Image: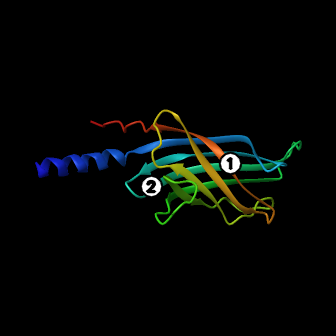
Amino acid sequence: MKQLLVIAGLLSVVGFAKPYQLNCTAKNQPVGKQWLVTAQLTGTVDRGTKVATLQELEGTLSISLKNEKEPWSETSLHKRSVESDDYYHPVKYKNHYRFELHFEKNDSYAAEKVDFLLPKLFEVDRANRAYFILNHVNDTFGGTIALRCNVSENDPEPISR
């Protein structure tokens, strides 16, 4: 009986660690009274029992003043792999993985990091809510925006014969 439980436990962990496609967007999310943030993040997520890994990340982040056509700040992200912070002990966002993302610094954008919070129990083929926490952008801006994240199963690799 113990052997069956061990095998069942191992199979459940293997099933849980399946990689998924991730596509997150936010359009003109308000932060404070005068800012709007638009963001996109795509890649894959491989979740384990304690730590998750984001891979092949591509992202954009644009911050605008309300009623302005041109963005106040723009940047992008290209990252091969980043693991969640397994020491993250949230006060507000419980049961979320936290990833520290470092968007490219340029003339209009300078910040230490953006925290990406993804629910540990996300639903496949449904919209999930995740968050970007913007930390100290250009010595002026900070805040949190909600992203709509669609998570889907990766297409299996074709079997070559």
Identify the amino acid type marked 1.
Ile
Q: How crowded is mark 1: few (under 14 residues within 10 Å), some or many (20 or more)?
A: many
Q: Name the residue under label 2.
A: 52
Identify the amino acid type marked 2.
Ala
Q: Locate residue 14 relative to residue 119 in the image: left or right.
A: left
| Residue beneath the point at 30% across and 48% down | 14
Q: Is residue 31 above or below residue 141?
A: above
The residue mark sitting in front, 2 or 1, is 1
How many numbered callouts? 2
| Secondary structure at numbered mark 2 | strand
User: Where does the image place residue 119, in percent across and percent down from the top left?
Assistant: 51, 48
| Residue beneath the point at 76% across and 60% down | 109
| Residue beneath the point at 49% across and 47% down | 44
The C terminus sits in image quarter: top left
User: Where does the image place residue 35, in percent across and percent down from the top left?
Assistant: 81, 49
Q: How far apart are marks 2 and 1 (CA)?
A: 21 Å
Q: Residues within 10 Å of mark 2 (few under 14, many from 20)?
A: many
**What mark, if any, has residue 136 been given in the picture?**
none
| Secondary structure at numbered mark 1 | strand
The answer to which of 77 and 30 lies nearer the viewer is: 30
| Residue beneath the point at 63% across and 49% down | 59
The answer to which of 144 and 17 lies nearer the viewer is: 144
Q: Name the residue under label 1.
A: 145
The answer to which of 101 and 89 lies nearer the viewer is: 89
